Image (cartoon, grey):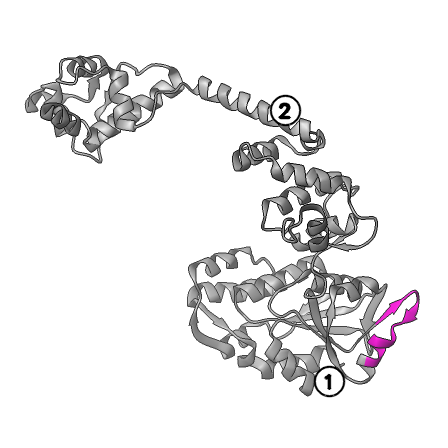
Amino acid sequence: MDNLIEAKKFLNQPVFRKLGQELARRYYSKGSFGLSVGRQLFRNESDEALRQFLGITEWEWKSRKAISVESFERALKNSLLEWSLAEFVVFTTEKPLQLKSDVEEKKRVLHANFVTRLNQIDPLFSEKLNVKQLTQWHEDLGGDFEIFEAVSKALKQLPKEWTRLPFFAYQQTGDAHFFDETKNGGRLLLQMLTALSRRMENDKKLSVVEEKNIILNEFQLLRDDIHNFVSVHGLVAEKNNTISQMWLNAWSEGVTWNVPLKEILRMDSIYPGQGNKVLIIENSAVYSVLLELVPEIAIICSSGQFTYAVWQLLRKLSENNVKLYYSGDLDPEGLLMAEKLIEMFPDQVQTIGMSLESYQVGQQLSKLLPQQLKQLQKINSKELKLIAKKMEISHIKAYQEGYLDIILAEINEKMQK
């Protein structure tokens, strides 16, 4: 018994495991082990144990470029273990031998069974989801069909009037977060609504967050619209050709306020109370300072990211041909947001304070992470690319607080003429 254990231990060395993996690969793809195996396969392992097992002298081994599969199998049968080649492969790989054709046929049968079960729940899934989506769901969920049953039920009871997504999820499943974007239920619902949408094609000038929300809105579903807001100053709005008294009062009294998405969607038209220019500020602290220093201009604060509320507000401003001026931190995230705005509204957007001069003045000691540096490769705008190139070399970012004087000078030059 001890000799058998030692024999197995000997054949469990890296060189034999490497050989077993190669033989398993060949069997999987071709149904045979082949005639020989080149010694270059073992270039990263010592193959001395293999030489000893085959009983080949060191002098002869040096001249050999390959080993015979037949001779290796003969050595296996003559060993204490008396193994076949197949038994050796199973031992070293710790997996049963499989043919590719058998594996693919098994996958095909399992997938067909998966689709059959889906059709029993609701044939709409196999009609509207593409092959890639169905395959991915099969891999992700296997035999768990609870999500499909819940989404099928939801699709049959889509709301007839505006309903917040968490309420709809609770009504359908008892779980207010069931259709959250990060969960499988939310992913599947959005895929199905996208497939059912009457929109002919995606608008390349829409952000991803806009695309998702527009799809939901088409079916009278709203994400969290109260906490999805944007801070504004100096804007007025109209509904049914009548100026909203709330917006008008906020503008006339110089009040800055957080406008929820619901209020933005409710308005037909939004524009500056004075002039035709709006400043978009990324940094909330800088936004607060500018409210005091230049209270006469209209300002929006994006608070570091473009939420759906921000995008909808910008859409309504752009519809009134409002000139948009963006000022963000000189880091990869700030440059990418400026790039996205220029891409979305090429005839209406300019930057404020986002120059090489600002970058030199406002540089901070904090270093950029490798994943942040990769983002700089997405910058294509001519002026922003100059900053990105400098940033790739220095690995340093610049904050708006460091070049506030330049921002103010450009506001006076570009916005107050």
Q: Which residue is drawn at 85% across and 78% down?
A: 248
Q: Which residue is drawn at 55% across and 64% down?
A: 333
Question: Where does residue 27 sit, x and y in percent of width and height?
Answer: 35, 18
Disc 2 residue type? Thr
Residue 206 visible, this orientation: no
Which segment is the magenta one?
Answer: 237-249
Q: Which mark is on residue 295?
A: 1
Question: Where does residue 383 sit, x and y in percent of width and height?
Answer: 59, 65
Badge 1: residue crowd in 10 Å (few <14, some 14–19, many ≥20)? some
Question: Element type at marker 2?
Answer: helix
Query: For this rendering, which residue is in front, 31 or 386?
Result: 31
Left or right placement of residue 123 versus residue 99 in this view: right
**Residue position marked by numbered label 2 in the rendering:** 116
Determine the residue located farthest toward the front in the rendered image: 174
- Can you say whether 399 is above or below 239 in the image? below
Question: Where does residue 1 sit, x and y in percent of width and height?
Answer: 11, 23
Determine the residue located farthest toward the bottom in the rendered image: 293
Query: For this rendering, which residue is in front, 215 or 405?
Result: 215
Question: Element type at marker 1?
Answer: loop
